[in-house]
Image (cartoon, helix red, strand yellow):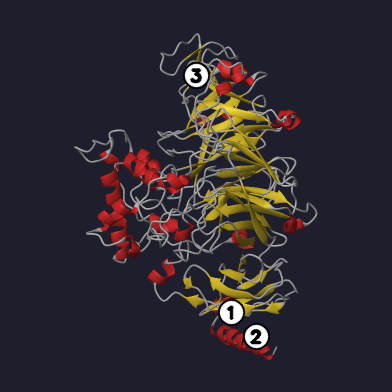
Amino acid sequence: MRMTRGLYLGAAMLALALAMAGPSTQINAQTPPALNVGAAEIGGIVTGPTGPEAGVWVIAETTDLPTKYAKIVVTDDQGRYMIPELPKAKYKVWVRGYGLVDSAKVDGEPGKLTNLTAVKAPNEAAAAEYYPQGYWYALMKFPDKSEFPGTGDSGNRIPNSMRSQHQWLDSIKTNGCWGCHGLGNKATRTIPEDLGSFENSHAAWTRRIQSGQAMSSMIATINRFGAQRGISYFADWTDRIAKGELPFAKPERPQGIERNIVVTLWDWGREKAYLHDQISTDRRNPRVNANGKLYGSPEYSTDWIPILDPVTHTRSEVKIGVLDPKTPSSKDDPMAPSPYYGEEKIWDSQTNSHNPMMDQLGRTWFTSQVRPAETEPFCQQGSSHPSAKAFPTKQASRHAAMYDPKANKFTLVATCFGTHHLHFAEDTNNTLWFSGGAQVLGWINTKMLDETGDTQKSQGWTAFVVDTNGDGKRGEYTEPNQPLDPTKDRRLSVGTYGIGVAPDGGVWTTVRVFPGFIMRTVPGNDPSNTALTEIYEVPSDDAKTPGYGPRGMDVDRNGVVWTPLSSGHMASFDRRKCKVLNGPTAASGRHCPEGWTLYPFPGPKLTGDAGTGSAEASYYTWVDQHDTLGLGKDVPFATGNQNESIIALKDGKMVNFVVPYPMGFFAKLVDGRIDDPNGGWKGRGMWASSGNRTPFHGEGIGKGDVPKLVKFQMRPDPLAK
């Protein structure tokens, strides 16, 4: 008590002395009002060399609970902080912020005032160590727009297929390297010593991309934009950083409502596994599974599904299985030794469980591999299945699985169509729609499956057919390799990625080819034969705001589509603005540029990028239809993968909610849950999981790190309890 009182008296005397020197210094030097810290809170004042530190993070972390737990808040404009609702435990508490280096970790316990001293970074290099990875990645250089189209290996070593700088950037950003892991963190902007000795950085990078079980996909990705030319840019990037080059832009500290966020983190999953994403509730009704357990998808790394109970802070797991033991495993993939795990094959998954969604009963559905890729006979030519009669299939690279926590049981469904993401419709059949089918859109009638247990009868799929003759119905169509016939409809040969279902029942999907498309499919009364599709191209040739590269997407309550673009934008598409919806021009997708609006993401631009977007390479956009965070209904949120954040578009402005610890936060999906509709901000929250394929690239760099489950809550002010 004496120490605290003395601190306040000393600060008051300092404020008085500064006030006598002139009015301009008085406001900044005033002692912030004292805080009333309750039994479940840690609070105090953060002071730096020049006074209270505003807009910096205070982190409290403990290992006293069943799993490692941390909570993070932001200081107000007077340097005060309040960490609310802390479980009883002993914590380490410290300060992190832009322009600082981490303060010493001090002991803290709920119920105690804990004032902290911020430490100014001694130089720009020390400060930049805490910048989000995108600020470092923005230093990467790329071919000038004048070098396109590429002239091949005998010319400028850019593939002939690369028609523009934007196509190159799309291949190296969201729809390339950034689709799986971050770039620009300490682990990637430097060359690991354990990789070996090499003549130069070009040779080191050539070897580096062969490391681990992702070797094949990394080599395939870099070959898309010209391996040798592409590697030369990575080598140049790391060489310049090794010589002391620093980011040319500096991130801003949290401002306004960004300071009201409360971030809670739990460890979950396995050390040698990674998480793609998680689910907490039913997208259609966020009160389902209130205060319940969350479920993750470990994709290519393991068949063990992580589970976390946020009430008891306990984690567990359950194994998802396959129908056919001959189902391929990631353990069989080729690899070169990793600088982190050597020759050990750390991934061992047959199921490749990619994306979870929860239904109205609290059961979790996954896109998951259950058998080899060749489909069963009922899917193929000659089958009596209604969908097979209309459009038979031969391959399905991923399928479906459902986990019922009450029965502790999985139901596995061998679909005739490939799956990637999934989304429930708001209909009486609780229809579950899937992206990822090669040339088809698939679904499961989950009501029928529950009633009959018949996995064959309960599923269906349809081809993508555009109404190019304009008669408003699906009829005879031309194939993609045939000339367009204005008297007939047109089938599209496309693969889909993101998916969302609008309130009117239209199923929206994204198509990841350059410059990219979104599609709307209306099922009709017999989807296998009546479904009609509309396709809309991202306006890459817009002179003022060129965009390209959609990935994950969602739909708001008005039917407006929201998707991130690898051009560094969040994009909306409002079909209501379209002057043309069908007819002969509709198959190209270029008939409604007026439906698009593009919003640049925060963060620096890429060096030499001729576009208008930032360096951000956002993976997914999710719409908070039910105001689960507190910013309002229908606010779109994007995963800020280069900003290490979740980014909201509120009233036309970007709001950037950074997760500062551990550095490298990389989400692939967000969802929101209402645990108590009468509980104010405490009864609501948004959830995400770190989705980086490389947990060993995290803040600690190396073995031992595990994925994090993250909860975001929005207080009315930075000191609310």
Q: Amino acid at mark 2?
A: Tyr
Q: Amino acid at mark 1?
A: Val
Residue 380, x across and y down, in percent: 53, 20
- Label 2 SS: helix
Q: CA distance from mark 2 to mark 3?
A: 74 Å
Residue 339, x across and y down, in percent: 37, 60
Give the residue at x 41% y 44%.
176
Question: How would you rate the neighbour count of disc 3 (Cα within 10 Å): few for under 14, some for 14-19, many for 20 or more?
Answer: many
Task: Answer with mark 2 or mark 3, whichever residue precedes in sequence.
Answer: 2
Above or below: residue 356 compared with residue 704: above
Q: Which mark is residue 491?
A: 3
Above or below: residue 558 compared with residue 97: above
Which residue, given by chain and number where applicable, does mark 1 sit on? 106
- Label 3 SS: strand
Name the residue furthest left: 154
Q: From where the camera sits, is residue 604 visible?
A: yes
In the figure, residue 581 lies in which quadrant? top right
Question: How would you rate the neighbour count of disc 1 (Cα within 10 Å): few for under 14, some for 14-19, many for 20 or more?
Answer: some
Is mark 1 in CB contact (under 8 Å) with mark 3? no
Which residue, given by chain and number where applicable, does mark 2 sit on? 8
Above or below: residue 585 compared with residue 191: above
Q: CA distance from mark 1 to mark 3?
A: 64 Å
In the figure, residue 197 lies in which quadrant? bottom left
